[in-house]
Image: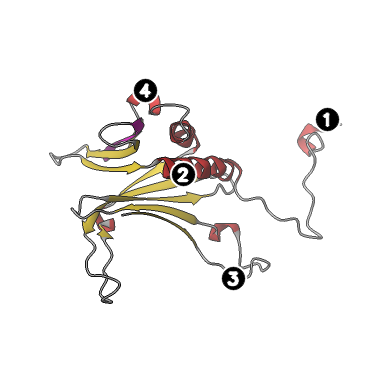
Amino acid sequence: MNSTTNDRTSTQDNNTDAAQPHNYRPKLSFYHANGKGTGSAVRFEAIPATGDRDGVVFMTLAQQKSVATGSNEQGNRQHATFDWTNRVTVKLNFGDLCQMIPVLKGVSPSIAEGKGLYHDSRATTTIITLAFQTEPCRGHALEVSRRPKAGSEPATRIRILLNAAEAYGLGTVLEQTLGLLAFGIPQPFRPGAATPPAPGDADDDAPDA
């Protein structure tokens, strides 16, 4: 079963001071469960830029934990669940998205000619791959592989195959998100607020007396 949800954190009246930019945190999820319990899910959460902090998109993948049981007719339907406790989360920056979007929109066949994105931290090494495939199933294969640097634990790999509609929609959404990651959420003009100086009018541009 394939499904997509778009969840947005609810706020109070958008015309009040309670609705501040930091409350804007949309989520987009894709759930691919199957009858064998070998499915997976992926969730994207956009964090807009604020002040001197660049925006990011958190991408989280989880393996299927249980299969769906029961039926709606009998009133005992239990949906499939996913193992979010053992999830794998990666932080995608502006540059990462600029490499993923062309693949999702059919411009490039894969990221970095199949090499993927390389994320390195003190504790782990993470490889993110995204590629269009035709066999054994047609779609865009997204996979995250994370290996700890210490110990002998095997790498954790989670993979999900997005169909054409999902890849197109995700690529479009991420493309629109680039503005949030670069510039944040535009602030509405408030009467009485100081108007920022126009380019060339700032004090730094004024000649010395």
- Identify which residue, 196 or 205, lies in the foreground: 196
Mark 1–mark 2 distance (CA, rounded to whole Å): 51 Å
Q: Along the polypeptide, which appears first: circle 1 or circle 3?
A: 3
Q: Which residue is mark 2?
A: 170
**Residue indicated by mark 1:** 208
Q: Residues within 10 Å of mark 3 (few under 14, many from 20)?
A: few
Q: Is residue 122 visible?
A: no
Mark 1 or mark 2, which has the lower sequence index? Answer: 2
Secondary structure at numbered mark 1? loop
In the rendered image, residue 192, in percent from the top left (x then y), is placed at 81, 60
The residue that label 4 is drawn on is: 113
Start and end of the magenta stretch?
121-133
- 117 or 167, nearer to the observer: 167
Q: Is residue 176 left or right of residue 191?
A: left
- 132 drawn magenta: yes
What residue lies at 28% left-to-right and 50% top-to-bottom?
Answer: 40
**What is the secondary structure assignment of the residue under circle 2?**
helix
